[in-house]
Image (cartoon, helix red, strand yellow):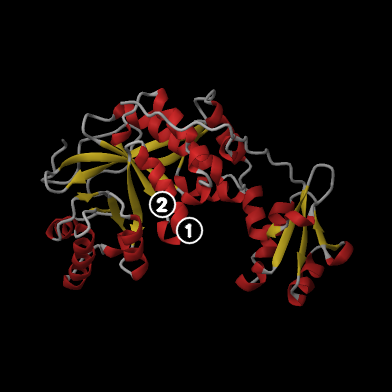
Amino acid sequence: MVCQGKRSAHRCVCRQPVPELGVTGVVLCSQSPVVNLKLAEAFEPGPGGTFMVGESGWPERLGEFIETLSAIERRDLLASEVDEQGEANPWRAKPVEALLARVRSPWLPRLLNASAKGDDPATGLRAHFQPIVDTRRGTVYGFEALARATLDGETMPAGPIIDAARAHDAMFQFDQLARQAAIRQGWPQLLPGERLFINFAPTVIYDPAVCLQSTWEAAEAVGCDPTSLVFEVVESEQFPDMNHLKRILDAYRDLGAQVALDDLGSGHTALHYIDELHPDLIKLDRNLLPRDPGRANLSLLRGLVDYAHGQGIRVLAEGVETAAQYDMVREVGIEYAQGWYFAKPTPTMSRELEAVGVAGG
């Protein structure tokens, strides 16, 4: 079976190149009299109560200045980019820390644009794979694809990439390219019956028919079977539009894929999302599984697992790092487990599990 994705005449923003950085300085402004006094002491005053920072080494100077401000004062400070023509657009002002994060990650456009073109083997998004274990059989059920990057031949973890993508307003491009990399690199390595788990952020999918088109194209290119894919909603409890999220999940399910909610906690919000979305799987927040679990943890966990099972939903526990955690997972009937107790993420799918008593499938 081959993914036959929906086609659209529209071109998603996720396919647009990320603009290269052309910032030569910033114009700062604040509504806080206290912050303005500090600005006047540190930088040259400009028109309309603004302050210009543009001399050589200005990012370092700005970073040092921000360190003198409290968290509240930082929220009151906005910055507009000064372009190569020496002009700034006040309508595009943003929190100063967000702009500084962009300036400190000038590599991000090159990374994502190279990944989109696929013409530079030393630079681009890559996927590393961590096994997911079937706790009933002690064998590998599937793998989660975790985003990494190669920049000039050096490997970079996901955290800095995501932070930089947010700073550059490039989460649309990052999320789409990460999904493509997961499918292109992961699907050919899967064995029959295994599942490939792929993360996605619902906030960047404004129209499933448009935004998911490139995902289906990547799947078609490698001849993937969509029934082997499981799409995970990251930060699902922070996404407020339940109807839109349903439309996204339905778009995945229409092609035969499964869906999972990631990092679910034990509160009312988690139960509401389970009821409304009825995913195929839920992945529990790792905080529900302390490193040295006790009876109180067992009772709380069992309640959530029983609730999910009552609706025909399977459960996966993340962050399993000890034998005690694995014993607890099996005791409460959780079907799948994932964590360093079994294996760390690697570029090539490994079925050699480290935990004693767990087979490698």
Q: Secondary structure at mark 1?
A: loop
How many marks do you count on the picture? 2
The quarter of the picture where residue 45 lies is: bottom right
Residue tagged by mark 1? 241
> Residue at the spot x=48%, y=58% of the render?
241
- The quadrant holding residue 292 is bottom left
Q: Amino acid at mark 2?
A: Lys
Asked if 140 appears above or below 162 in the picture, the reply is above
Front residue of this view, candidates 291 and 41: 291
Residue at the image point whose x is 33% and y is 46% from the top: 259
- Taking the image as shown, residue 297 lies to the left or right of residue 209, namely left
Q: Earlier in the sequence, mark 2 or mark 1?
A: 1
- Secondary structure at numbered mark 2: helix
* Residue 139 spot, x, y in % from top left: 16, 40
Q: CA distance from mark 2 to mark 1?
A: 9 Å
- Quadrant of the image containing the C terminus: top left
Q: In x, y percent, where is residue 69?
A: 66, 70
> Looking at the picture, which amino acid does disc 1 mark?
Asp
Q: Which mark is residue 246?
A: 2
Residue 85 position in % (x across, y down) = 84, 42
**Which residue is located at x 45 percent, y 34 percent?**
215
From the top left corner, tell me how far across and down residue 169 is, in percent. 61, 48
